[in-house]
């Protein structure tokens, strides 16, 4: 199966077949990452621009690493030093970039829909690296890859997403992807951090974490997005941690070798106990490694790499 898409903007409308194509393509990419020389000539002469209007450690470095392994040239717009600060609009910035003929543009922006807007304006392919509270598709894909690698299929598996669902683009993208692949998704969080439209997501929601723990195959703790919160949503971090923090005691209650996941960055001692984040059940660092492989796969497919074999 080939891939005819120009952009990767969201997971909500991505068919299961295409999700699986990306995950299957990521497998040989991960193997390339463990080679002594991690550099392919595949996309020599191609250029990838990173536009990060919000902070990022994992996603930005991961895209840059992935592009470099594939042999592409990368440029990062230093937003703080760009002409956006001189009054230039995002549209004019985009047109300026277009004039430099990039092949792919990766964007993170605080506004939902920013990636879609860019994709309409640019001839280059656009990858959404997180837009506001809307979606973070590549995060969900690397999460899925990690679950499949550890559990085989996610079909029928019980996956808990715990915490700040309201502000989480990671939660939204994971819900669409996991539902699509047949997982049983349960969203757990305090009432103030569950969106009002959550019923329309079509998955179980609850305020009671302890009741949902037995039989869980995955617990994914979400970051408390304090920078997006108005005051008053939480009585205190201490109370949040008592009710929703992932502790050794809670992990035991699952009765399984449950996978512990977190998209990062982690607020240790709030969302997750440090000993659990560092435990053998935690795959938080594997998620980061797999992120490079999955982003290599996405770029490879968008830039027209064949799917039958990966060039070595
Ligand atoms: N998971 C994630 O998006 O992390 P960064 O904000 O560090 O990119």
Image: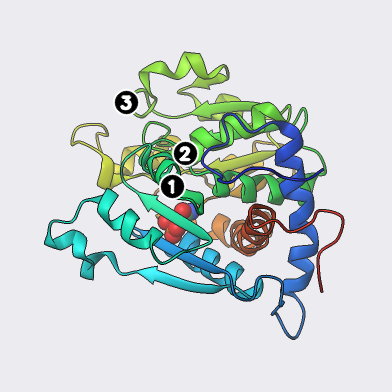
* Number of residue marks: 3
- Specify which label sits upstream in the sequence, 2 or 1: 1
Q: Which residue corresponds to the image point at 35% horizontal and 41% vertical from the top-left?
A: 132
**Label 2 lies in ligand 1 vicinity (Cβ under 8 Å):** no
Q: x and y percent of residue 270 in the render?
A: 39, 49
Q: Which residue corresponds to the image point at 65% horizontal and 42% vertical from the top-left?
A: 252
Mark 2 — residue? 135
Q: CA distance from mark 2 to mark 1?
A: 6 Å
Q: Is residue 29 left or right of residue 71?
A: right
Give me the disc on residue 172.
none
Q: Are marks 2 and 1 in contact (CB under 8 Å)?
A: yes
**Label 3 lies in ligand 1 vicinity (Cβ under 8 Å):** no
> Which image quarter is the N terminus in?
top right
- Specify which label sits upstream in the sequence, 1 or 3: 1
Q: How packed is label 2: few (under 14 Cα within 10 Å), some, or many (20 or more)?
A: many
> Which image quarter is the C terminus in?
bottom right
Q: x and y percent of residue 181 in the render?
A: 73, 31
Q: How packed is label 3: few (under 14 Cα within 10 Å), some, or many (20 or more)?
A: some
Give me the disc on residue 192.
3
Mark 1 — residue? 130
- Specify which label sits upstream in the sequence, 3 or 2: 2
Q: How packed is label 1: few (under 14 Cα within 10 Å), some, or many (20 or more)?
A: many
Which mark's residue is nearer the viewer, 1 or 3? 1
**Label 1 lies in ligand 1 vicinity (Cβ under 8 Å):** yes
In this rendering, is residue 99 above or below 312?
Answer: above
């Amino acid at each position: 199966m080939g891939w005819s898409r120009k952009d990767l903007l969201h997971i909500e409308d991505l068919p299961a077949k295409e999700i699986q194509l990306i995950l299957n393509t990521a497998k040989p990419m991960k193997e390339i990452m463990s080679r002594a020389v991690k550099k392919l000539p595949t996309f020599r002469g191609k250029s990838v621009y990173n536009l990060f209007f919000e902070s990022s450690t994992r996603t930005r470095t991961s895209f840059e690493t992935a592009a470099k392994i594939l042999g592409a040239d990368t440029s990062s717009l230093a937003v703080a030093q760009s002409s956006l600060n001189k009054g230039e609009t995002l549209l004019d910035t985009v047109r300026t970039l277009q004039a430099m003929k990039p092949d792919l543009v990766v964007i993170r922006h605080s506004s939902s829909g920013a990636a879609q807007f860019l994709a309409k304006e640019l001839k280059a392919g656009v990858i959404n690296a997180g837009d506001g509270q809307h979606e973070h598709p590549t995060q969900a894909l690397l999460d899925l890859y990690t679950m499949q690698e550890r559990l085989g299929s996610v079909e029928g598996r019980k996956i808990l997403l715990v915490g700040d669902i309201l502000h989480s683009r990671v939660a939204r993208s994971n819900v669409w992807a996991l539902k699509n692949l047949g997982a049983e998704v349960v969203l757990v969080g305090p009432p103030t951090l569950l969106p009002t439209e959550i019923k329309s997501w079509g998955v179980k929601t609850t305020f009671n974490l302890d009741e949902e723990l037995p039989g869980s195959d995955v617990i994914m703790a979400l970051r408390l997005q304090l920078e997006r919160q108005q005051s008053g949503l939480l009585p205190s971090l201490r109370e949040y941690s008592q009710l929703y923090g992932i502790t050794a005691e809670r992990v035991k209650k699952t009765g399984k070798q449950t996978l512990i996941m977190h998209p990062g960055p982690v607020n240790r001692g709030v969302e997750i106990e440090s000993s659990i984040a560092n435990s053998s059940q935690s795959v938080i660092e594997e998620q980061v490694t797999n992120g490079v492989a999955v982003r290599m796969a996405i770029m490879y497919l968008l830039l027209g790499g064949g799917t039958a074999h990966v060039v070595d």
